[in-house]
Image: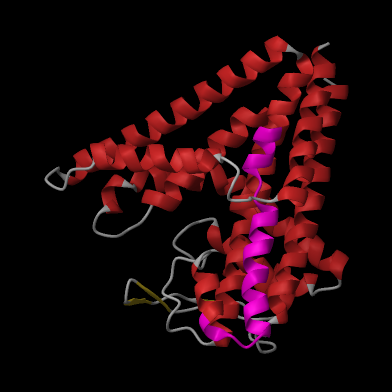
Amino acid sequence: MEKLICFHFCIAVFAGFILDCIIGDPQFLPHPVRWMGSLIAFLDRYLYKESLSNGAKRMRGALLVFIVLVFTVLLSIFILYFFYSLHFFAGLAVESVMSFYCIAARNLRDESMNVYSCLNKHDLKKARKAVARIVGRDTEVLDETGVTKACVETVAESLNDGVIAPLFYLCIGGGVFGLAYKAVNTMDSMIGYKNERYRYFGTVAARTDDVFGFIPARVSAFVMMTSAAVLGFDARNAFRIWKRDRFKHESPNSAQTESSCAGALRIQLSGDAFYGGKLEKKPLIGDSLRPVEIDDIWRANRLMYCSAIISLVVFLAVRICGILFA
């Protein structure tokens, strides 16, 4: 019976992925990530005090991470226990929905292709607004190439954060692990900055996200290289650029997929960007073997979806083999 439950658990992850492909993230649906964001924002206001010492800020930031993680894990365990105790298929349905909420491939595709559509219509103003929804940099100063690069970089980086890392944790521990990862990633995106307010308060959130994303980021890079070979892109160059440029980012994880994508598409990404009106110097990733063009957004999405499918198949295959031969 235990093995049968584990097989149904794999079905929940697969069902969640299919639901994401079909439905995406419509705004009218309630979403646990938005609830996590509300909890993080509340704790941020309650725990952060400008008058605290740097060490105290770091400790309170660690307390925020602990509270959010414990709350997310315990609540998701309770929900699954409740529905599985009602009926096995009720629990399976709920876990499938949890898996669906953890994966963001369709939303990433929709948002990035909205940028592509605006650029195709030569509406740079709308394209800047569209890309501002998915990047943190100042977009008002970007030209067409800058908007395109920002969009491609986001697709490449979010392949790990929004697709492969959630699948990785879902295949290890189901909805509980998947939502725990989403909580960690959401905390990093909200308070994991090195600005004046969060330099110390957000340290633990940022480091926790680095730890959770360490293995999936490297898996994502190699899966993207495999996808490049499958789709006819430059897989050899993807490996070369990844090997050379994978650490050209403050985060140990962010440049893993970005370098692989830049190499596969034979373009140059990253570089200096404005954040809050201030110029931040960043190293270039990849070689400019050809100019960046609008269609690179579409190509990056092809790489993203192919990588997602390969990852899902491999992760589930490993999980099923573990069940069969345990």
User: Left or right: 250 with respect to 52?
Assistant: right
Please give the range of residues in magenta: 97-125
Task: Determine the residue positioned at 71% across, 69% down.
Answer: 300
User: Left or right: 14 with respect to 282?
Assistant: right
Picture quarter containing residue 212? Answer: top right
Quarter of the image containing the N terminus? top right
User: Left or right: 133 with respect to 168?
Assistant: left
According to the image, what is the colour scheme of the structure? secondary structure
Task: Determine the residue positioned at 40% across, 41% down.
Answer: 38
Task: Determine the residue positioned at 29% across, 60% down.
Answer: 195
Picture quarter containing residue 285? Answer: bottom right
Task: Determine the residue positioned at 40% across, 44% down.
Answer: 205
The answer to whether 273 is drawn above or below residue 104 in the figure is below
Q: In the image as oriented, which residue stretches furthest toward the front?
A: 28
Instruction: Give x and y (percent) for residue 127.
Output: 56, 78
Residue 109 included in the magenta stretch of the image: yes
Instruction: Give x and y (percent) for residue 321.
Output: 86, 30
Picture quarter containing residue 15? Answer: top right
Q: In the image as oriented, which residue stretches furthest toward the left?
A: 51
The answer to whether 317 is drawn above or below residue 72 in the figure is below
Between 302 and 284, the one lying in front of the other is: 302
Between 122 and 108, the one lying in front of the other is: 122
Residue 101 included in the magenta stretch of the image: yes
Question: Please, what is the dominant secondary structure of the magenta stretch?
Answer: helix
